[in-house]
Amino acid sequence: MSEDRPLRGRKLADRRVRVDRPHQPFFRYAGPGQLVAREAASRPTTAVGRAWARLKSTAIGRPLANEEEIGERLAKKKALAIFSSDAISSSAYATEEILRVLLIAGAGAFIWSVEVAVAIALLLGVVSLSYRQVCRAYPSGGGAYVVARENLSQLAGLVAAAALLIDYVMTVAVSTASAVAQVVSVEPGLYGVRIEIGVAVIALITVANLRGLRESGNVFAIPTYLFIGLTLLMVGLGLVRVMMGDAAPVAPQPDALRAGTEGIGLLLLVRAFAGGSVALTGVEAIANGVPAFKPPEARNAAATMTTMAILLAVLFVGITVVADAYQIMPTMEGGQTVVVLLANAVFGGGSLLAVGFAVATALILFLAANTSFNAFPRLAAILAEDGFMPRQFSFKGDRLAFSWGIVLLGGIAAGLLVAFGGETHALIPLYSVGVFVCFTLSQIGMVRHWFSVREAGWRWRATINAVGAVLTAVVLIVVASVKFWHGAYLVVILIPILVAMMLFIDRQYRSTAAQLAVAPDRVVKPTRRDHRAVVPVAGIDRATIQAVNVARSISDDVLAIFIAQDPVRATEMRARWEAQLPHVPLVVIESPYRALTGPLLAYLEVLDRNWPGERGVPVTFVVVPEFVARTWWERLLYNQSVKRLRAALVGRPHTVVVDVPYRREDPESTPDTGRSAGGSAVSRPDPPAAT
Amino acid sequence: MSSISQGAFRRAVVGLAGGVSDERIVRLTASLARLQRAELVGVHVVEIDWTLPIDADVAGRSEEAQRVLDMAERTAEEVGQKLQPVLLQARDVGAALVDEASERDADLLVLGLPYRKKFGGDFAIGRTIPYVLKNAPCAVWVIREPIIEERS
């Protein structure tokens, strides 16, 4: 199609025509018969749709194309901030968890805190070494779930996945509660609105993550590095003071917890170890998100894992050593946290550095939640691709983020925060059980992996994983038994429920796929099947006539059905129909009980039964005239019965529902019956069939 | 003209023949256009012989013609430059290119020169390039395809 008249050239005979390219704003040809949709093709056409798109674009940014995905990948520095903020931030409360347990045996038991912290750091070393190997062996991500699924069994994989999903939800709730506690430490007046602050922060992180990986990395990198820098400074300064003998014990706060009188024993140390093991939470996140790294993905992920483990060990053990030297006493819920008390002691209470540290700690604890916002949706997407979660979880949103997973995580975590009243210590018992289930399963899985591949160095790799498996299994038993009655039993109940749910979804998808499957070698031949069209009508108007015309284009066998509520109206309708649409038979059904859908469905049944058996069941096209409302209030006024009718017909065997929309603006919608019997065919667009 | 000799231009028309050299010339011109914030117009001309009217529905129905322009647009976008695609029908490709460049007030017209290996190898200079070189009101760049020497 040419644009307009030929354009004249410089010479007399040189004429040319510019050719219209109607596809150009919406599509791009990529090959023969192959089009790629442009952004404009997805642009909403209605006013409401456009307003929603504008709002979404303001909140989360413009939609990104698939080819921009590589630009969304993370370099190591940003990836450390995104994937390690969870692990690194646990150094802000892991020491406190140890001290709270040891306090039962009196302040003198604090001396054991360093030994407990070192033992946890050693465990961290083994676990991170093992996960480095997971990164290299499974570069497509998925962490413990994929390792267990591939090397143990599908069930083991699902147990790991369920534990991980619970863990990620807990991370968001615990980190946010902990961050709010940190803020309340500095400003106690905010204790009353701690839940509201927590929920608002979760909402903000949710939106930031919906904006995509790279942007959330930009937002979250600074606080992470600020926390690392200030904590290293605090630990360094504290150690110098300890060595110089300047570390004077800090007097207990008025709201300090009372020291117990229980004797120090192995059980107490084990409980302290279980409490402090929250430091290991989040270590697996990097292994789950390997594809988010810039190439070479596996190498970069493994390097980031090592950096994270070293940083976490230094910070955690450092804080514990300095806190022990200063004899910091934990306070009651709502009071100052151990790290804030320590910062006050080292930097000086109220100093810029102390306040800066408290702010950085609160920020990184908020950001720890962000790690889960990256890991949870990725795991959910892998599970969805494997058929264990609804498929929506594998769809990427406008910004190439797994939007469904992000929104679900935000919703559940906020709900949990509200349910537990925003208290960190009420949430922590639920926390580390899931993590250690994953650690143990992935380590066992890796041992089997090395035995099956037997590549260079497999013996020492398998040994590391075996040691890790034994250690994490022991910790799992300890953590589960110590924390069982404090809330960990909930995890023990939740994991089987989640696994059962995932198996149910998988079975559902499999059975549907089996029912819908077409053999790959089958050549589909054109079939001929009888069909007829039925048009439910409520009167004669332009919408009805348009529907009747559509029905006649579908089939020669067209029948109009009018459900009448009183005999007088039925007689009037028949008279008018036979005068104006004599070529289409009308069946009038009187409905003394005023029902519309029931008599229509019953009549369709009767039609089916009357069909000659030797011709097979015909396809019935139910052609429904629908008046297109222009405004929201028109939508309330019209088409309510059409919706009911459609809902009743969906799923009816051998039935196809055809909507025929009538727009008042359509010039071609003028009826073809002319102005015979009744003058104007219609004076106003009566609500069609079923309004 | 002196600015063109230094590689500077403000509006360039790139003639797209639908061959392998299209991507090369678009990429090169788009990179240069991006540096100096110049406009880029990609023109593909479908030649209509005298048996058909000039406005016959030929190019609009040709997926290949659309693909040539879409690929050029995509190549330009890959280097961060916008390319305005134009599809023309004309009796003579050279004349249409010159007229389009003239009407758009372009100061540069870019063409690719393909190399054919057949019959010992030669440049397929054809009719279009000589016509454009002789008649274009602006500077003309003819970008030669590299000759890949076969090792004996």
Image (cartoon, coloured by chain):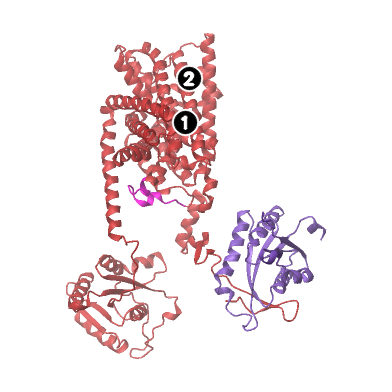
Find disc 2 in the rendering and name its residue: A318
Q: Is residue A457 above or below residue A10?
A: above
Q: Could you tell me if residue A63 is visible in this image?
A: no
Q: Chain of mark 1?
A: A
Tell me where residue A613 sits by quadrant. Answer: bottom left
Q: Is residue A83 above or below residue A110?
A: below
Task: Give the residues drawn in magenta, as a range.
Answer: A383-397
Quadrant containing the N terminus of chain A in the rendered view: bottom right
* Chain B representation colour: purple
On residue A362, which mark appears?
Answer: 1
Give B60 or A64, whichever is nearer the viewer.
B60
Task: Confirm whether the magenta stretch covers residue A46.
Answer: no
Q: Which chain is red?
A: A
Quadrant containing the C terminus of chain A in the rendered view: bottom left
CB of mark 2 within 8 Å of CB of mark 1? no
Kindly give the residue lying farthest to the front in the view shown. B152
Tell me where residue A441 sits by quadrant. Answer: top left
* Amino acid bearing label 1: Ala
